[in-house]
Amino acid sequence: MNYVYNIDSGRCKGCGLCVAVCPKEVLQISDEINAKGYFPVYQAHPENCIFCSTCCIMCPEAAITITEAASKRANVA
């Protein structure tokens, strides 16, 4: 299965909980400020993500989502 990982940097307050719990050290706190004045997280190493969703569970702002990507299957008649 393919998954889509998304961080809503506008909602992220940069608390770092997701960074602390990520088993593969995928996330880091950005050095760029978002519109609310926070330093949001970003995927520094997306290739290491195992889509465990621990970051999603820990995020108090629900700023991180992992969804299943729509598969592109050919119609077989």
Image (cartoon, rainbow, N blue to C red):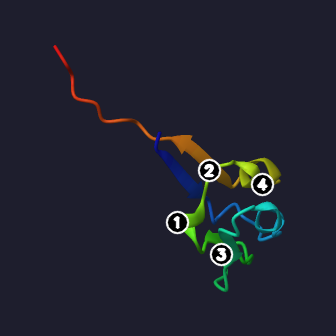
Residue 5 x/y as whole percent:
55, 54
Q: Residue at x 61, y 54 (%)?
A: 50
Query: Which mark lies nearer to you, 4 or 1?
Result: 1
Mark 4 residue element: loop
Query: Which mark lies nearer to you, 2 or 4?
Result: 2
In this rendering, would 21 be left or right of 12? right
The amino acid beneath tag 1 is Glu
| Cα separation between marks 4 and 1 | 24 Å
Query: Which of 65 and 25 lies nearest the eye of the viewer?
Result: 25
| Cα separation between marks 1 and 2 | 11 Å
| Cα separation between marks 2 and 4 | 19 Å
Q: Residue 31: which quarter of the image?
A: bottom right
The amino acid beneath tag 4 is Glu
Q: Residue at x 21, y 22 (%)?
A: 75
| Cα separation between marks 3 and 2 | 25 Å
Q: Residue 34 carries which label?
A: 3
Task: State the residue position of label 2.
Answer: 51
Using the image, determine if residue 62 lies above or below residue 20.
Answer: above
Return the disc, 3 or 1, that comes first in the chain's sequence.
3
Return the disc, 3 or 2, that comes first in the chain's sequence.
3
Q: Counting other residues with Cα less than 10 Å from the Cα at mark 3, is it few (<14), some (14-19), or many (20 or more)?
A: some
Return the disc, 4 or 1, that comes first in the chain's sequence.
1
Residue 40 x/y as whole percent:
69, 72
Task: State the residue position of label 1.
Answer: 47
